[in-house]
Image (cartoon, rainbow, N blue to C red):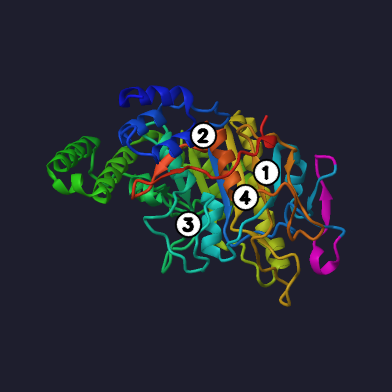
Amino acid sequence: MSVNCCPDFLRTHCSRRTLLKVGALGGWFTQSQLFEAEAAQPAARATARSVILLFQFGGPSHLDTFDPKPEAPPEIRGEFASIPTSVAGRVICEHLPRLAQLADKYALVRSVHHSSSSHNPGAYVALCGRESPINIVTLNASANDFPHPGSVVDYLAPGPRGVPTSVSLPTMIADGPFRTPGEFAGFLGKKHDPLWILKDPNEAGFAVEELHLPTGVEVARLDSRRDTLQQLGRLSQLSEQFAEVQGLTEYQQRAIDLVTSPATQRALRIDDETPAVRDRYGRNTYGQSVLLARRLIEAGVRFVTVYYSRGIGGWDTHRANFSTLKESRLPQTDVALSALLEDLQQRGLLESTLVYWTGDFGRTPKINNEAGRDHWPACGTVLMAGGGIQGGREYGSSDATGAYPADRPATPGDITATVFHALGLDPETLIYDQLRRPMPISNGKVLRELLG
């Protein structure tokens, strides 16, 4: 077989996984031909155009949200009662009444498990579907990390010009001294980092100054600055020699595009919403962030991540689990998530927008001595809706105490594989780390039972 015929042969006869195996042989074809053949592989039929990821940092208790155990003893069952939902036989926590009425709009994966029991590695695997070999809470983000799924989308299937492909808000999970891995583009480079909106959309006069023109600066001057940057980039040997500098230059270029984008500016004007709509999402940081996520999706953003992080409370309920959840976390989740699902459906966007709600891990079945629950990666629940996910369905189940998967165990990698599949991206699509080593965008399996 000649080198010249390899790409054509691969296009028609080889899967992405085969490409990875054959590429390791070396000598049959060049790396550029491998890239060409990989790019030519047909994409899966997309059921979603965009994604909203609601990430509950700290680890939400599955037993006190979407997988209650009403028949378990009190030390496991806890203080909350269960209520029926719009799906026959399904019960959820009594403090989620609006979501109980919408149970036919979302699916539950009640058997998600992994082995990372500390927050940062737990968040990393939950976000990216890849476990870190180091299970310590001080695990720090690095340029070698596997990228956030929004960064993968930005790399493989970016959105329209003038709007960012991926946006994260309203806080980072941790902003010093350690930054949580999985929130950034990792080895794909800084230019594929999400656009961060680190402002509280619930504050009066909310505005993102970084995306507004300074006083006296006109678009013509920005165009001139753009030309100057391009000329300097061509002259600079650094931009050719160092990928990181190249990434920063492209990041500057993207910032200029965004600062002059009417679509982005309109999306951020949350005050354009009526008071009634804003009230439906909840007048708090989380609720208004979820509303802003909907507006960004409408503007063409493909992937929005809303972090319910420790910066706005978080879900790390080692103490006073039940009072904390009852007073804030559960009502805020119930109001914001139900408003989002209803709003997306009313606007004709639910079919094309995949929403998923997850966190670092579940929490211990047994209540501790401080009325709290501790970290428990052995079992948890992920909620998924829209974008081809069939409402009312369930995948897997936990045992009688919520300790371990009892049926069809799933991993965070299976969740990311399903999300990518819904977006029309084959989970076996190869991306390359800084050492040019190929790896698939997900090592999980698509949960096809949840898809229509």
Tell me which residue sits at (49%, 51%) in the image. 201
Q: Which residue, given by chain and number where applicable, does mark 2 sit on?
A: 426
Kind of residue indicated by mark 3: Thr
| Residue 193 picture location, percent across and down | 39, 48
| Cβ–Cβ under 8 Å for marks 2 and 3 | no
Identify the mark nearer the N-term, 2 or 1: 1
Rendered image quadrant of residue 1:
top left
**Left or right of 98 in this view: 270:** left
Looking at the image, is mark 1 or mark 4 nearer the viewer? 4
Kind of residue indicated by mark 1: Ser
Label 4 secondary element: loop
Label 3 secondary element: loop
Residue 338 is tagged as: 1
Which of these two is toward me, 272 or 337? 337
**Left or right of 387 in this view: 379:** right
352 relative to 243, above or below? above
| Cβ–Cβ under 8 Å for marks 2 and 1 | no
Residue 411 is tagged as: 4
Identify the mark nearer the N-term, 1 or 3: 3
- Look at the image and give the residue range highlighted in magenta: 72-88
| Residue 438 picture location, percent across and down | 41, 43
Label 1 secondary element: helix
Tell me which residue sits at (45%, 27%) in the image. 41
Residue 171 is tagged as: 3
Residue 277 visible in rendering: yes
| Cβ–Cβ under 8 Å for marks 4 and 3 | no
Q: CA distance from mark 1 to mark 3?
A: 22 Å
Label 2 secondary element: loop
Identify the mark nearer the N-term, 4 or 3: 3
